[in-house]
Amino acid sequence: MNKKHLSLALAAALGAGLSTSAFAYGVGDFFGPVPTPIQQAMGGLSIGVGQFHQNYAEHATSGSGLPNPLDTQTGNITAFHIGYAKMGPHFGYNVAYNVGTGNTTYNGYLQNVNTSTGQVTLTPYTTTTQSLSADLHATIRGGFSPIKDFAVIPNVFIGQHGWHRAIQGIGGYTENYYNQYYGVGLTLAGAVPQPGIPLVLQVKYKAGHTHHAYMTSNISNDTAYLGSKPWTQYGVEVDYMPRSNLTVYLSYMHTKFKYGQSQIFQTEIGPAFEPNSTTKQNVTLLGIKYRF
């Protein structure tokens, strides 16, 4: 073989080797297993307690001449969490039940109707509201590691949410809101690369829709149907693992969704409808996870 042919052969062999290495990295390494510290941080029986900040607002129809928002309910209540999760090299799941309970502040209006003229007078009104929020959801996770100590965790989820509010004082009444929700999400997780520092950071985002949303009240025998609206959630979590089977975590999650305007339904005081509304929830939890 002359030098020219030898050079071409070496170039071809080198090119094939580089191509094979690049292909191997792209398939094998880019979609590598989720690092063990991240698997540990995302698994176990979890319990937590913290603060649930509620921000609910009902909105007037544009052009109605009514104040906007029509009413709000805001405040901090106690949050509780229990769940169980498993994360393997490429697949996992999570089931969780979250509760918020306590008293919040209602800001709205008392309505006084002049029976002679039909004129409605609105008087600003503030009172205490008993609030109970409950949420049950399940998540199926995939996962891979494109680089060392880092994982990409896509997921699909489904959940059920309920909220009971009991408005105290003059004209007080109770309402119960329910909705299912579903969607897709993504978690980016990174483990501290230094030995002896067992920390994992998770950044989470989910997006979806509510489904079969409705409201019932103690002043009506009817059900107000609230349609399907966007649902989003994002947050962060820090996990510290002092032992291989134990994690201490601190998390923050922001959830936002809407209810649509309902049909007209009958109440004890006449026909009514449920207006458009926005719910925002900020939940901070401190807890532990135990892996059996």
Image: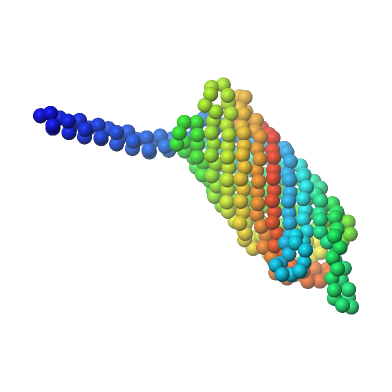
Q: Is residue 64 left or right of residue 33?
A: right
Residue at figure coordinates x 29%, y 33% from the top left: 18
Numbered-mark total? 0
Q: Quadrant of residue 20?
A: top left
Question: Which quarter of the figure is the N terminus placed in?
Answer: top left
- Asked if 36 appears above or below 74 in the picture, the reply is above
Q: Name, please, the residue furthest toward the left.
A: 2
Residue found 50% across the figure and 31% down from its top = 149
Q: Nearer the viewer, residue 3 or 276?
A: 3
The color scheme shown is rainbow
Percent x, y for residue 69?
Answer: 75, 60
Is 122 rendered above or below residue 88?
below
User: Of 30 and 88, which appears nearest the observer?
Assistant: 30
Q: Residue 143, percent across and down?
A: 49, 40
- Residue 264 percent coordinates (x, y): 73, 70
Residue 29 visible within the image: yes
* Residue 215 visible: no
Left or right position of 41 against 47: left
Residue 167: give x, y in percent of width and height: 83, 56
Q: Is residue 2 left or right of residue 197?
A: left
Q: Residue furthest bottom?
A: 116
Task: Identify the residue shown where x is 65% and y is 51%.
Answer: 256
Q: Locate the C terminus and report the quarter of the image it occupies.
A: top right
The residue positioned 71% from the left and 70% from the top of the image is 63
* Quadrant of the rendered image containing residue 278: bottom right
